[in-house]
């Protein structure tokens, strides 16, 4: 039986990846390592907690001794590394915690994998899940490809760029078998309501203002989280060693247009009159260093591995809204802890 470590599996994307691997691969034992920060939530994976091929481990990837002991004890065959500090706005107020988790935490995992594998790399793989934000910002045209130079602008993207570089460096220097993916913005169930889509869904439900940064003309490419999980599965199993794959939704939206669509769909779902939620839109002070546009050329993963998104944006958004409307308790729980303090600080309430 192969032993696979997935880090960050109580978070948004990680929980979808862990569920997929536990259910689809009974011949793997899946170890889910997560520190359960504000973004980690065991409620995200409650349906798999009793599975025979699954173990949850609470722990911090920044703690090198703990990580080394864990790797020695379990002798993992593969690592899918998703644990991270993931929110750009938090990286602006507290950049150091991004260096700790995203850079040092990744280093600790790389060192521990190198140490237990000792150059016997047959059947071993280290997979770093990263972001398209490492490429910086596009103008009105163009797409990020796998050969676009790194040019990160936020402390978040700088920390992810740095960890990507270390993963590559371990591949070049020690021969560590790695794969790396850089993906565009995800959305879907279990998304913590600090990022645009879940935050706005929560605010629409509660008839709170919708804080659009700057003029709202910033553009992102959006991918349904389950499609990302499918891509991750494929790259882990069929991606070529020492390669990067860009993953994207072929689905660019200006923030303001996306917010208007969300308002329309939510008004329909909530039985509110047309246009009611749009009245909640409030333009607020812009994010410093705000990247204008991200857009992905995902033709490499499409051509080499046959992956493409399966869900249209309208379908994905509807699934997402339905999930939030039928998971009121989840939403109430995640917005009851330190959330109010974060929200008030971030939006100067
Ligand atoms: P998330 O913030 O929802 O979850 C992160 C998880 O990591 C949480 O469960 C948290 O408890 C855990 N974690 C944080 N610090 C830890 C530490 N020191 N030790 C152990 N666990 C720790 O993030 P997400 O949106 O699910 O993103 C997962 C990964 O995918 C990240 O690496 C992120 O950079 C990358 N990514 C995210 C997106 C996106 O749109 N969300 C897009 C592309 C890439
Ligand atoms: P976000 O979901 O934080 O993802 P990222 O910054 O990683 O792309 O933000 C998506 C876009 O939405 C980005 O252009 C910033 C904008 N935004 C707002 O306008 N208001 C908000 O309250 C948030 C959280 C984001």
Image (tube, grey):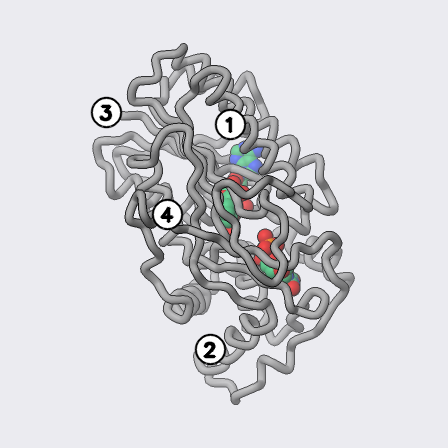
Q: CA distance from mark 4 to mark 2?
A: 25 Å
Circle 4 packing at 10 Å, graded few (<14), some (14-19), many (20+), is many
Circle 1 packing at 10 Å, graded few (<14), some (14-19), many (20+), is many
Relative to 270, 151 lies left or right: right
Relative to 262, 228 lies left or right: left
Residue for badge 4: 229
**Residue, x 48% and y 53% (percent of image)?**
296
Residue 306 drawn at (x, y percent):
28, 48
Residue closest to the far bottom? 273
Residue 26 drawn at (x, y percent):
22, 36
- Residue 194 visible in the current orientation: no
Looking at the rendered image, the disc whose residue lies closer to the viewer, 4 or 1, is 1
Answer yes or no: do the residues labelled 4 and 2 have beta carbons within 8 Å? no
Mark 1 within 8 Å of ligand 1, using the beta carbon: no
Residue for badge 2: 265
> Is label 4 in a helix, a strand or a loop?
helix
Q: Nearer the viewer, residue 158 or 346?
A: 158
Circle 2 packing at 10 Å, graded few (<14), some (14-19), many (20+), is some
Residue for badge 3: 1
Residue 20 drawn at (x, y percent):
31, 45
Q: CA distance from mark 4 to mark 1?
A: 21 Å
Residue 231 vertical position relative to residue 224 in the rendered view, above or below: above
**Is tag 3's residue or tag 1's residue first in the polypeptide sequence?**
3
What quarter of the picture does the C terminus occupy? bottom right
Residue for badge 1: 167
Looking at the rendered image, the disc whose residue lies closer to the viewer, 3 or 1, is 1
């Amino acid at each position: 039986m192969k032993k696979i470590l997935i880090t960050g599996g109580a978070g948004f994307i990680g929980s979808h990846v862990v569920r997929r691997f536990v259910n689809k691969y009974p011949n793997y034992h899946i170890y889910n390592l997560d520190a359960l920060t504000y973004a980690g939530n065991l409620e995200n994976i409650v349906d798999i907690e009793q599975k025979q091929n699954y173990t949850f481990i609470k722990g911090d990837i920044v703690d090198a001794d703990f990580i080394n002991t864990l790797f020695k004890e379990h002798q993992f065959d593969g690592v899918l590394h998703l644990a991270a500090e993931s929110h750009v706005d938090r990286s602006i107020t507290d950049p150091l915690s991004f260096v700790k988790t995203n850079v040092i935490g990744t280093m600790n995992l790389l060192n521990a994998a190198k140490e237990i594998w000792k150059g016997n790399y047959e059947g071993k793989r280290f997979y770093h899940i990263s972001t398209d934000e490492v490429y910086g910002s596009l103008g009105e045209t163009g797409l990020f490809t796998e050969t676009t130079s790194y040019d990160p602008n936020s402390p978040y993207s700088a920390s992810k760029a740095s960890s990507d570089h270390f993963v590559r460096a371990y591949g070049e220097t020690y021969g560590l078998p790695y794969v790396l993916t850089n993906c565009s913005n995800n959305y879907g169930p279990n998304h913590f309501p600090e990022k645009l889509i879940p935050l706005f869904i929560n605010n629409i439900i509660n008839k709170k203002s919708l804080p659009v940064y700057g003029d709202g003309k910033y553009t992102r490419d959006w991918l349904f989280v389950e499609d990302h999980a499918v891509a991750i599965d494929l790259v882990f199993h069929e991606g070529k060693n020492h390669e990067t794959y860009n993953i994207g939704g072929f689905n660019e939206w200006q923030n303001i247009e996306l917010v208007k669509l969300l308002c329309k769909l939510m008004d329909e779902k909530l039985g509110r009159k047309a246009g009611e939620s749009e009245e909640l839109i409030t333009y607020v002070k812009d994010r410093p260093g705000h990247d204008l546009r991200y857009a992905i050329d995902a033709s490499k993963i499409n051509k080499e591995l046959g992956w493409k998104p399966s869900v249209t944006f309208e379908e994905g958004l509807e699934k997402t809204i339905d999930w939030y409307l039928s998971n009121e308790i989840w939403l109430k729980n995640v917005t009851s802890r330190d959330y109010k303090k974060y929200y008030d600080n971030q939006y100067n309430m």
